[in-house]
Amino acid sequence: MAEVTVKKLLAALWLSLALAATPSPGFAWGREGHQIIALIAEKNMTPTALARAQAILGGDSLADVASWADDYRRDHPETGPWHYIDIPLADSKIDMARECPDGQCVIAQTEHFLSVLKDPTAGRAAKAEALRFVVHFLGDARGFERLHCRSLFQHYSRADGNPVLADDRVKRED
């Protein structure tokens, strides 16, 4: 029963992401953008899936936790790479060994946290953390928060976090 509910929850989250996946150039995503995606997800969830999600989250709504991963990242900078993946523009497919070394990207971490949600032996705290990350990552994926995918960038400065264009002359300043 719990597995069916988790599947419905995940399906509703992905559906909500797809519904909201229109381009949005020119504005920062931030807390409100994440909350909007979470509210859309909640509106598309079955009552059972929504109740299960809220139970996992200790009564919080998806919107309440939508920006949690960004807040968490401030004190846990090692989670920074989990919010994006760098894919060179010229590539027609993802090379996970190159773009996601050691599973340190949004794709691998989303898969990891989905597996925690599906694991019947995982505790509520582990599932709550996993659901917070998944909700956030789906919000990031909504438009890859102005280049979370960063396909235009070949590399970036890890020191200041600002990506550098392939020609090394222009830095992203937002």
Image (cartoon, helix red, strand yellow):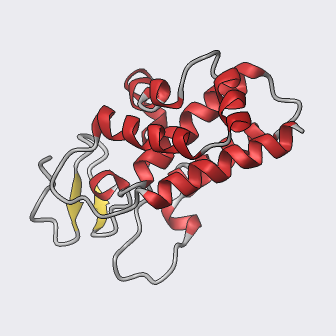
- Give the side of residue 139 with respect to residue 23, left or right: right
Among all residues in the image, which is located at the extreme top? 58
Q: Which residue is drawn at 57% across and 54% down?
A: 14
**In the image shown, does 22 or 149 lie closer to the viewer?**
22
Q: In x, y percent, where is residue 120?
A: 88, 34
Judging depth in this view, the residue of 70 and 63 nearest the camera is 63
Where is residue 142 drawn, in percent x and y? 40, 54
Confirm whether residue 82 shows in the render. Answer: no
As displayed, is residue 23 above or below residue 9?
below
Q: Which is nearer the eye, 84 or 141?
A: 141
Above-or-below relation of 161 to 94? above
Q: Look at the image and tell me in which quarter the N terminus lies.
A: top right
Residue located at (76% from left, 49% from top): 7
The number of numbered badges drawn on the structure is 0
Tell me residue 26's x, y (percent): 15, 55
Query: Does residue 147 appear left or right of residue 169 in this picture?
Result: right
In screen coordinates, is 24 left or right of 127?
left
Q: Which residue shows up at 66% across the image and 48% down it?
A: 10
Q: Quadrant of residue 117?
A: top right
Residue at 22% x, 48% y is: 162
Quarter of the image for residue 161 reads top left
Nearer the observer, 148 or 105: 148
Horizontal and vertical percent position of residue 64: 46, 23
Q: Eyeballing the image, is 68 above or below 34? A: above
**Looking at the image, can residue 165 be seen?**
yes
Q: Is residue 6 left or right of residue 11?
A: right
